[in-house]
Amino acid sequence: MPLSRSLSMTSLSGVLPAWEEDELPVEDLLLFEVAWEVTNKVGGIYTVIQTKAKITVDEWGENYYMMGPYFEHNFKTQVEGCEPPNPAIRKAMDALNNNGCQVHFGRWLIEGSPFVILFDIGSAAWNLDRWKGDLWETCKIGLPYHDREANDSLILGSLIAWFFKELTDQLGDKPNVIGHFHEWQAGPGIILSRSRKIPMATIFTTHATLLGRYLCAGNADFYNNLDKFNIDKEAGERQIYHRYCLERAAVHCAHVFTTVSQITAVEASHMLHRKPDVVTPNGLNVKKFSAMHEFQNLHSTSKARIQEFVRGHFYGHLDFNLEKTLFFFIAGRYEFSNKGADIFIESLSRLNYLLRVHRKDITVVVFFIMPAKTNNFNVESLKGQAVRKQLWDTAHTVKEKFGKKLYDALLKGLIPDMISILDQDDFTIMKRAIYATQRHSLPPVTTHNMLDDSTDPILSNIRRIGLFNSRNDRVKIIFHPEFLSSTSPLLPMDYEDFVRGCNLGVFPSYYEPWGYTPGECTVMGIPSVTTNLSGFGCFMEEHVSDPAAYGVYIVDRRSRSPEESCNQLTQFMFTFCQQSLRQRVIQRNRTERLSDLLDWKYLGRVCFCCTTPSIDSIHEETFRRATEEDPSPRMDRSLHYIQHIPLHKHIT
């Protein structure tokens, strides 16, 4: 599939080409970005909208607003309430508030401090039956009463369409309105806005198709059968037909349809029956992660904190050298096969065999950071950290006494022996500390008490391969079924600090429309493994001539069998284990040099053509489609900006 713009690199100097484009007349526009995850962290879309807020606010200023659902806790902890600067927005909010539907306004306390408009779904729930009827009359889509998420998305969409109607009535001729909607949860908003002929230009972005995610989770041979699936039948069998209809209707209602990667563009054209107009890859706010020459020092500091946790977790079995221990990790939503945890666990078994056969003195500790249902930390994990802390305190107590007596002896010109420096009590204390570290059971594989221990996919597969953290294993496993937090009593580290302390991130996903986790590793200078079925992996293959040389290993899951992919992943990890310390330092430097390629400052200004290499032809087709449906003068003016202004200027 041709790209209208491409940046191929044989080496990276850190300087990217500057694109010269027409100035965007933001004073004549209002941009509203609608997503379920505005101030509400659920998955990757939260990262998308949060990281690009700064560059969007810099360009749009007070003409940029985010819209999403209101949750009291999130509002109190993340949003600073204030009055909207635009009187028309204030009047539109008042219209909803006066009818019993609460709308909240403020600044989201993230970099860029964008304005947010949040709609209280609970306060408007009494309208649900009426709005279900409106949706049925509009597009013949019915929502079951038991699907709360779909019902909530309808309430949110109805409130947003109502808001846009009030707003455009207040604005008059200018400024013109552009609405950018993310994912199927925002779909009802775009469907209702278009059906009511509200004079605004609309953009819909899918980050992953709903049915695609379900099919892959069910172990379907997805990419080899894209053109063979009976879409309606598959959606119906999974009881998501109504959600699929909302998603597909939103895609076909939008003036401009975008997605985040070329591989998702192919998927969307089959699943949703519309080719995306452009591909807009996800970026990161690289400045947030930037540490310049300090990133190597930050790696050492964070690694030392992980080592402290490992000392406690493996107390009594700490017969491996932590200076020769590598830390691997996988993190993300708990989708066992979609995220590649199945192939990862199998490859760990093979890696363990290779390290034992070749008698390598390297130990690999692997972390699984995937949230699952738990009821608390397990006792053994907490006890390990308590034993480690007690041993540390004991060592410091003895060290203080030892240091003072040694100092006094040296002042007298004597070289003391151990007996004269440490008395019997000191030896007793040290012996008790040593006895406290004795352990009769193996270190736990998981840090928490799992609610579904016997059926949990990760634990079941660990039992199958027999990696139980025994002394003979060169690969140790720690399953942390909770997102990391600096306030945790067990592993008190934020995710960013944890990533910096690891040696390799492993993300062998089968279904990953973009993939922020390897991208975050890259901008922090940490090598990672991804696949050619992830948007990130395809992007790197397209733009970097030798990704592995820059610490981005790409497993082929598209043209190889699962067995071959597993062997390739095993070989990548084994080769990484064979590197010397100096080689790993050099590789981290090379990995960090890719940061600029993933910066929103660059990706926010580059869009890749998906259906045709001519951006102008996309503008013309979009304009023709929209004006045929709604020939009003107001719509003419709103779409003028989509026709004549480069898409990347408002689809960031």
Image (cartoon, rainbow, N blue to C red):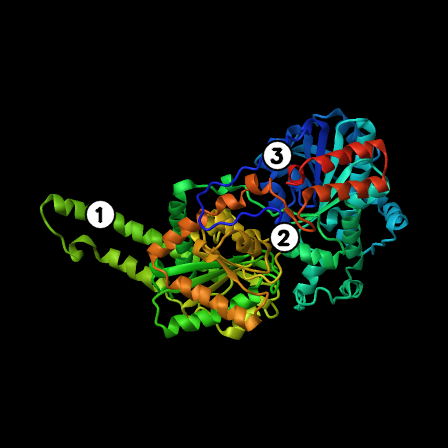
Residue 423 percent coordinates (x, y): 21, 55
Q: Is residue 471 visible?
A: no
Residue 552 percent coordinates (x, y): 48, 56
The picture quadrant where one finds residue 578 is: bottom left
Q: Where does label 1 land, which residue?
A: 403
| Circle 2: residue type | Pro
Q: Is residue 91 left or right of residue 519?
A: right
Q: Residue at horizontal 63%, vertical 52%?
A: 2
Which mark is first along the chain, 2 or 1?
A: 2
Of all residues, the one furthest to the left in this rendering is 413
Please, is residue 647 above or below residue 363 in the view?
Answer: above
Front of the two marks 1 and 2: 2
Q: Residue at horizontal 61%, vertical 45%?
A: 48
> How many dots with numbers?
3
Q: Is residue 528 left or right of residue 168?
A: left
Which mark is first along the chain, 2 or 3?
A: 2
Could you say which is closer to the camera, residue 639 or residue 215?
A: 639
Q: Look at the numbered disc 3 and give the secondary structure of its residue.
A: loop
Q: Where does label 3 land, which residue?
A: 21
Residue 430 percent coordinates (x, y): 29, 58
Separation (CA) of disc 3 from disc 1:
68 Å
Which mark is first along the chain, 1 or 3?
A: 3
| Circle 1: residue type | Gly
Separation (CA) of disc 1 from disc 2:
70 Å
Separation (CA) of disc 3 from disc 2:
22 Å
Q: Look at the numbered disc 2 and give the secondary structure of its residue.
A: loop
Q: Where does label 2 land, which residue?
A: 2
Residue 556 percent coordinates (x, y): 55, 64
